[in-house]
Image (spheres, helix red, strand yellow):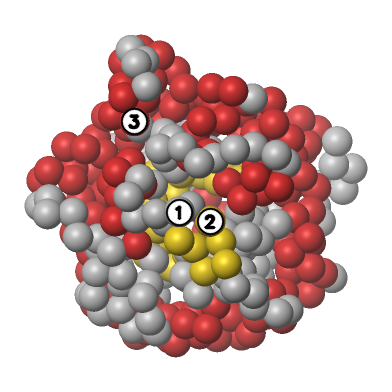
Amino acid sequence: MNPINDILNRFQTMILDGAFATELEKRNCDLKDPLWSAKILLEEPALIGKVHHDYFAAGADCAITASYQATYEGFAARGMSETEAGDLIQLAVKIAREARDSFWAGVADKTSRPRPLVAASVGPYGAYLADGSEYRGDYNLDEAQLMTFHRRRLQTLISATPDLLACETLPCFAEARALTRLLLEHPNNYAWISFSAKDGLHTRNGEKVRDCARWLDDYEQIAAIGINCTEPQYVSSLIKEIKKGSSKPIIIYPNSGEQYDPIQKCWFAGGAAHFSSLAKSWFKDGAQIIGGCCRTGPEDIKEICRWARG
């Protein structure tokens, strides 16, 4: 059964967690590393569980795992065996599931909110490259090559039994097609597809978001279509574009509004004021699944819950 529809049939909004890597940085983790947040799977996995728990406590209905930059290729470059890499990729899901189960066991009123989901993060090919190309999409790889890159990790994540996959921060349509076709190899599983956009109409690579949504609309295993890791000022327009191409639930979790330098790996400029108010406007525009990406935190999720759940 589609886990997103299961929640949206009972609640008007599904609330995601917020940023993961930047939340780890707030907790004194040094992520200036090609593995980024996946580095903490090696160094301090218990802290990952603590971040998940804090987001659940803030009201999140879904945890996105710390596997965004966890790849066989990235761990191999660190000198790890294939078995060790696979174990770490699955560990990201295990940590999130255990944090969810522990949190849910302590919830007294289980009718006031849904049992949270665990979404296994599938970051783009560019995240493995760690050179900023995830914000451009200029990989010079075709769809078949992208399928080859993603296939083994997708199988490994699915075997750890998350509730669904979060195919996120995709900068180009080719990667969305590749992941969708791979999902067909696992017919009992669902995923959301979330693009990173350069403006109110286009993916980072320049394709029209409306056209991407129209193609994805035909695939039953795609549980939602949306946008993440994008500047907030573009979100309302992007929601409207997705609605023109698809009737699937729309998922939105943009950045706070600050700007990221992928080369220096640092943030600059001020964030968007009143993130929760912006989120409410996105709900009115048609987004049903809402959270935050880079530089958002548990307090932002708590504020969203205040108007979404009273």
User: Which quadrant of the rendered structure holds the C terminus?
Assistant: bottom right
Tell me the crowding category of disc 3: few under 14, some 14 to 19, or many 20 or more residues within 10 angstroms, Cα based. Answer: some
Q: Are marks 1 and 2 in contact (CB under 8 Å)?
A: yes
**Residue 284 in sight here:** yes
What amino acid type should be assigned to the residue bearing mark 3?
Answer: Gly
Horizontal placement of 72 versus 145: left or right?
A: right
Between 299 and 219, the residue placed more toward the observer is 299
Q: CA distance from mark 1 to mark 2?
A: 6 Å
**Residue 249 in sight here:** no
- The picture places residue 10, in percent across and down from the top left corner, at 66, 62
Mark 3, residue position? 74
Between 142 and 111, the residue placed more toward the observer is 142
Mark 2, residue position? 266
- The picture places residue 165, in percent across and down from the top left corner, at 43, 45
Q: Residue at x 20, y 50 (%)?
A: 178
Which callout, 2 or 3, points at the residue further toward the start of the chain?
Answer: 3
Mark 1, residue position? 264
